[in-house]
Image: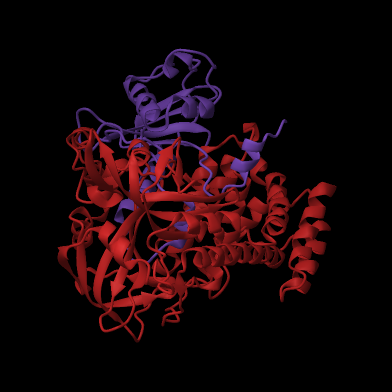
Chain colours: A red, B purple
Amino acid sequence: MVPGDGGGALMLGIQLAELLANEPVGVPEALEAVDGFDRTLVGGLGRLVPEEAAAVTALAAAVSASPLGAAATEAAEKVVAGSVSDERLVTLAASRAALLGAVHDAQLAALDAAVGRRREEWPAPGGGEPPPDRLLDGARSWLRELALVGWRGLTDDSLRGVDQALTALWAEPAARRLAVLLDGLAGELRACLPLATWERLPVRRWADMWAAALLLCQPGVLRAEEAPAAEVSGRLLPLGTELHEHPTAVQLVVHALLEEGGDRPARLVRFAVGAAKVETLTGPTVWRLLTGFPVLLRALAERRALSVTGLSPLEGGELLWDESAVTLGEPADPFVTARTQLAGAVAAPLPPLRRHPVQLAEPVWLEGYRVRKDVLTLDGHQLRLDVEHLPAAGPLTPQLVGASTACVGLLCWEADGWTLRPLGVRATVRRQEVEVHVGDWAEGPTDPKAAKSEAKWGDPVAVLRERAGRLLRA
Amino acid sequence: MVENAETIRWERRATARVVPGARPRKVVKVPFVELADGRLQGVVSSGSDIARVYVSAVEAGSHDVSCGTNNNRPCGGARPGGCKHVDALVKEAVLQYGEERVGRYLRAEPGEGELASRLRGGGISPDRPAAEVFSRFLRHLAYLEVPESAAPLPELRWFPATGAVR
């Protein structure tokens, strides 16, 4: 490895060892304060037992040295005394977010140091119009109710309380992030009814979503995406594709390198396209919801580069995808891109309000490892593989991951450590080398068996759209 | 409750999987199925008239059934224990959500055998939720009218897609 060139592309055993060995200081303490608060949301802030009251106080104490300190102390005192207001809930959610933001920053710094990744701010727009504030009132009052009664106290009625707010939020593009988050949370809570009977609850996950939603409801946080003064042009080389999905939303996120030409280093960028959906539309059918982006889907299915003339950069290393600003380029093997160019690429930091450990998803390239029982071993160092999050919409399976020797994946972090979520692998199947990427099925399954199985469902998107056309305009 | 290390680890995961995702199914006959408002409820297409749909429901707990057209005409075949529309609804609900989840929501008798046989064969529901369920169906269909979007949704990181089978 040439000193100074990073080496973030090929993740070496020695880098992996450094990442796994260096747990940043303060992380366990920060998470303990978060955990304590999260547990108070199980039974609700409306009736705290002494142990829970102490956890609320401890959350405030954990941020006492920060600018939030005084407000957090006051909010905790009032909430413990039984006086819960929107403002106090937001202060507690912000305290929690500050701790998790610090964990995010520490882990990302550890990762950047281990793989030698450079990170630079890049010009980003200030954002467009915010949604009208009254639109957020319904969401705020529902989130307050959740906090008061707690997960265990939720009923069908409390969940129905969000429906009206959701209808209004979905109709406002500038509020889409909040609509998607609340709908996902509400759907999951509904799926768990009756909640009193569950032995264990996803305490961190639901508190995360509750707090994130509450912060999105603050004036000025949500804004429409606005075309910025500067635009970027050049060549986009896709590295890998992720899919995110809940009952009413699907999103495709592409990690790619942007070459702007000249002697500028390539940028590590992401862009996303998404659609609203209904629960039965899942598996390979989800690609059919994204057919409004034919150039992108074809580039993924055929593993091609894209020529870009004037895409808008957004905060955090993202691009605002626009089919009219891109054309299909020549074939581009994602593995070649990762192996030869990911090392020197420059990444961007996330804006402060988005810093949370769940947002850690850094593309890396690994080669020459072995896999046993969903654990990868590289030069004697072990990394867990996240095979739980391989989408049904794509061809990547746990078996292929298990048989792989090279991969582009995302390093993700949870409270129990780093994992690698594969986006594409090279594997040996029946003595033949194959390369399989999540995006391979972007234009429909290429595997005859999967194509046949998908055909069995007919075209549910078309069937439901026909029903919608007939009934919504009847 | 005994808390073991695995439970604690799961409870601290931001992407902990809570319930298995819905499975795809043919939607021609039963375009809408949901577990909400204390019922398994949904919309079943009429076999004879493309413009007509039946709204069918099974109450959680009592397992009382109801079935009628969207403009509130009762289903001719409705009887305690169901009709062909209710049968189709239960069958498609099991395909979509799995027997365990539907059974739990309806508070079916635990045990072996098909879900339909473990429902209590309740009476005809005094409630006629047709209008309410139909409006939920329309609300559901309205999602398909939302335009696609290229604005990144970072909050979906809490929802990485799953489901590739071993």
Asked if residue A93 lies left or right of residue A431, the reply is right
Q: Quadrant of residue A140?
A: bottom right
Residue projecting furthest to the bottom: A229
Q: Nearer the viewer, residue B99 or A349?
A: A349
Asked if residue A422 lies left or right of residue A384, the reply is left
- Is residue B65 positioned above or below A432 on the image? above
Instruction: Residue A181: tell me if it is visible.
Output: no
Q: Nearer the viewer, residue B102 or A120?
A: A120
Q: Position of residue A267 (x, y in %)?
A: 35, 73
Q: Position of residue B62 (x, y in %)?
A: 54, 22
- Is residue A176 positioned above or below B42 on the image? below
Q: Position of residue A376 (x, y in %)?
A: 44, 44
Q: Quadrant of residue A372?
A: top left
* Total number of numbered discs in the rendering: 0
Asked if residue A3 lies left or right of residue A281, the reply is right
Q: Nearer the viewer, residue A293 or A391?
A: A391
- Is residue B117 positioned above or below A177 on the image? above
Residue at 62% x, 42% y is: B9
Instruction: Residue A235: tell me if it is visible.
Output: yes
Q: Quadrant of residue A334?
A: bottom left
Q: Position of residue A98 (x, y in %)?
A: 64, 67
- Is residue A96 positioned above or below A38 on the image? below
Asked if residue B164 lies left or right of residue A220, the reply is left
Q: Quadrant of the N terminus of chain A?
A: bottom left
Residue at 42% x, 28% y is: B98
